Image (cartoon, grey):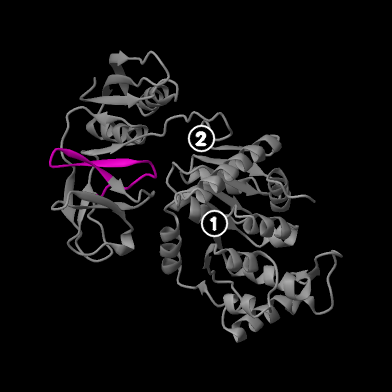
Amino acid sequence: MTTAQETIVLRGHIIDSLILAKVLDLILMMGGSFDLDQVEIGRTREDQSQARIVVRAPTPATLNHILRAIQPHGAVVERDSDCAVQPAPADGIFPDEFYSTTHLPTEVRLNETWVDVQRVEMDLGITVDLQHMTARTVPMADVRKGDLIVTGQAGVRVMPLQRPRERDVFAFMESKVSAERPHSHVIADVARRMRMLREERRAGSGQAKVLLAGGPAIIHAGGRDALTWLIEEGFIHVLFCGNALAAHDMEADMYGTSLGYAMNAGHAVPHGHAHHLRTINRIRAIGSIRDAVESGTIKRGIMAACIKTGVHVVMAGTIRDDGPLPGVITDSMRAQAAMREAIPGVGLALLVASTLHAVATGNLLPASVPTVCVDINASVPTKLADRGSFQAVGLVMDAASFLNELARQLGRSL
């Protein structure tokens, strides 16, 4: 016998985006049942549809779990109420029942008015200013005692992404990972987006950045020249990396090696294992990567191209870093904050050959940002999807092949 029920409403392109089917499936999978009380289907692709659904569950706890699960798909409890808020009990601590955000567009209801939540990102809290009627996400570490934090699910509305008009690889906005899928058409769609975003930037739009988060395998595998070309041609505007990518990129410029292997010969050179350390040491002596480029010590490569074209670079360190290079942020929370500040305006993200940076960047990105995760190891794009970045398209291939083909699609002659 059912002991709990709630009426929810879905609005939007819930039919062609398969949102209605997903919501009904979740209700049944989680032990509930439903009645489709009312369904209004739009006649054209532009028309929105609406469904009123009575959700039933055997216990209030099960009903709450169901409502929490279907909320990211846009399900809103019909009986409108303002969101509940509680003051943070101490610096760096949320109230026990804080609302944990998704990376989907979100609104909260304040004084009977729906207000957009600014800087949407997954796994954060929401702080509100009742006087100014504003709401924004806040990381746990940044919350201060007394900040008003949204608690519970009531008065929170999440807008699911609608299926876009463009019929490219991003059209379905759901994670796809396969080692056997042909890559050429995916890369062609990525190139088309990058070309469009570059044109928008040249036309004066600052909200058209392409972000690349990359690992040192880009250098080792032979993708350095292609990525350098992409940066020089204005296709990349933000670079997230660690100490290693920058160090081995500049090692290649100074010594012609990467990890001590000759780039053109493919074999180890005498004492080559120390080349990356000598590179780091030289840059530290000069003072900064910018100074090394401007003095002519570093003439070409990824870091030189970033300095010369004004690409925004965030280098986040790890426990295993040598040196590190000047400019590497060794405090992980400071690095996270620096990456977060670079996200607004990003219209496409390429996560290439770096497990840690791929997952970290995916966590920071709104779901509205088309994302491609490229790695030779299928577990990396799979892990990204498991963490909630369902908009990421996964390509299981080596970094060099991806970057070389991408550059070729964008006009680079080999």
First of labels 1, 2 by sequence position: 2
Asked if the magenta segment contains residue 377, the reply would be no
Q: Nearer the viewer, mark 1 or mark 2?
A: 1
User: Residue at horizontal 59%, vertical 75%?
Assistant: 289
Q: Is residue 63 left or right of residue 303?
A: left
Please give the label number shown on residue 226. none
Q: Is residue 352 left or right of residue 334?
A: right
Tell me the SS state at disc 2. loop
Return the x and y of residue 34 as percentages of the image width and height. 30, 19
Q: Nearer the viewer, residue 342 or 308?
A: 308
Return the x and y of residue 284 as percentages of the image width and height. 60, 83
Residue farthest to the bottom, as pictured: 285
Q: Report the quarter where the N terminus lies.
A: top left
Kind of residue sitting beneath label 2? Glu
User: Residue at horizontal 69%, vertical 51%?
Assistant: 403
Q: Give the range drawn in magenta.
A: 98-116
Please give the label number shown on residue 237. 1
Q: Nearer the viewer, residue 175 or 206?
A: 206
Return the x and y of residue 87 as percentages of the image width and height. 17, 57
Crowd class of label 1 (few under 14; some 14 to 19; many from 20; radius 10 Å): many
Please give the label number shown on residue 174. 2
